[in-house]
Amino acid sequence: ETKLNGYTQIDLLQNRFYERAKYVVDTLRKQGYCYLDDFHGEVTALSILSEVKNLHQREKFTDGELVSSNGNGSMLNKKIRDDKIAWIDGKEENCQTISHHMTTVNTLIRYCNGLIDEYDIEHRTKAMVACYPGQGTCYKRHVDNPNKDGRCITTLYYLNPGWTEEKGGMLKLYPGGSEEAVKILPRLDRLLLFWSDRRNPHEVEPSHDVRYAITLWYFDKNERARFRKKQEEDERKKAILSQQENGSKDGKKD
Ligand SMILES: O=C(O)CCC(=O)Nc1cc2ccccc2cn1
Ligand SMILES: [Mn+2]
């Protein structure tokens, strides 16, 4: 391959990933969040946007699920989120550039993993493609991973060309749980990363125009394994309890 002052193209590419990973990890350490602009370049960003719009037209988005306001499932189902979402694994038809985004962020995170010793990042979720349809739709203040479900880094890729603050839809982040918020413009080709746990409560302000983003959550291997083990134990306990209940019911019958 062509040698540019001793470097091959691959070397340059790997250096580029290494440089960005270094900046990301240093910034995450310093302020808990970090964003990279012009992540893919405009042409690729617009191609991802057209695939997302196509998903939207093909009605592939579902309503964000309702969450009961006081947690006991009562009828007071209050909407805390108005986003419409689609889960994408990247193999779907007409999602090639979305898939390219997923592999590119994987590579960046793999380089970051080499620099972060508090986590061992090997897996991620599918891509959650989200759309806020405008008319004041928003997402109330929340923490992505409040109870150690394994997710350690949230990555949000924004797809909104020409977005301005007048359109609302700013991501308000409260880094370190502090009260003064940081406002992030959800502009095209911006990749935002932040720790998924209680260090980063955040909310989406009411949006007055259609607003698209793609989220990928990355797991810490150990926290995820502990969470899965706990989930299985809870399942077993539930199964035993329901058997006992059925058993006692049978007992009453005869
Ligand atoms: O679009 C943005 O700027 C961020 C939106 C956002 O926080 N979305 C979001 C979406 C979620 C969907 C399911 C479960 C947890 C979730 C947490 N956060
Ligand atoms: Mn969130």
Image (spheres, helix red, strand yellow):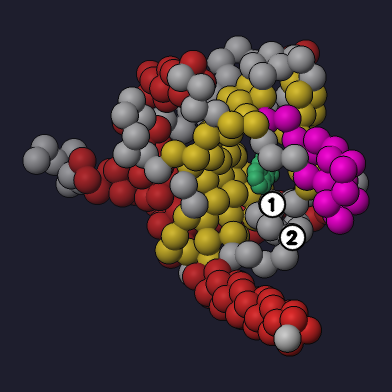
The x and y percentages for residue 119 are 54, 69
Query: In the structure shown, which secondary structural element does the residue marked by tag 1 occupy?
Result: loop
The x and y percentages for residue 170 are 74, 27
Residue 127 position (above or below residue 253): above
Image side of residue 149 versus residue 69, left or right = left
Tell whether label 1 touches label 2 (CB within 8 Å): yes
Q: Confirm if mark 1 falls within 8 A of ligand 2.
A: yes
Query: In the structure shown, which secondary structural element does the residue marked by tag 2 occupy?
Result: loop
**Which residue is pictured at 56% across the width and 72% down the height?**
228
Q: Residue furthest left?
A: 1
Residue 94 position (above or below residue 250): above
Q: Which residue is mark 2?
A: 146
Neighbourhood count class around disc 1 (C-alpha, 10 Å): few under 14, some 14–19, many 20 upward:
many
Image side of residue 115 versus residue 194, left or right = left
Image side of residue 65 versus residue 229, left or right = right
> Quadrant of the image for the N terminus?
top left
> Quadrant of the image for the C terminus?
bottom right
Q: Which residue is mark 1?
A: 144
**Which residue is pictured at 76% across the width and 15% down the height?**
135
Looking at the image, which is closer to me, 17 or 181? 181
Label 2 to label 1, Cα distance in Å?
Answer: 6 Å
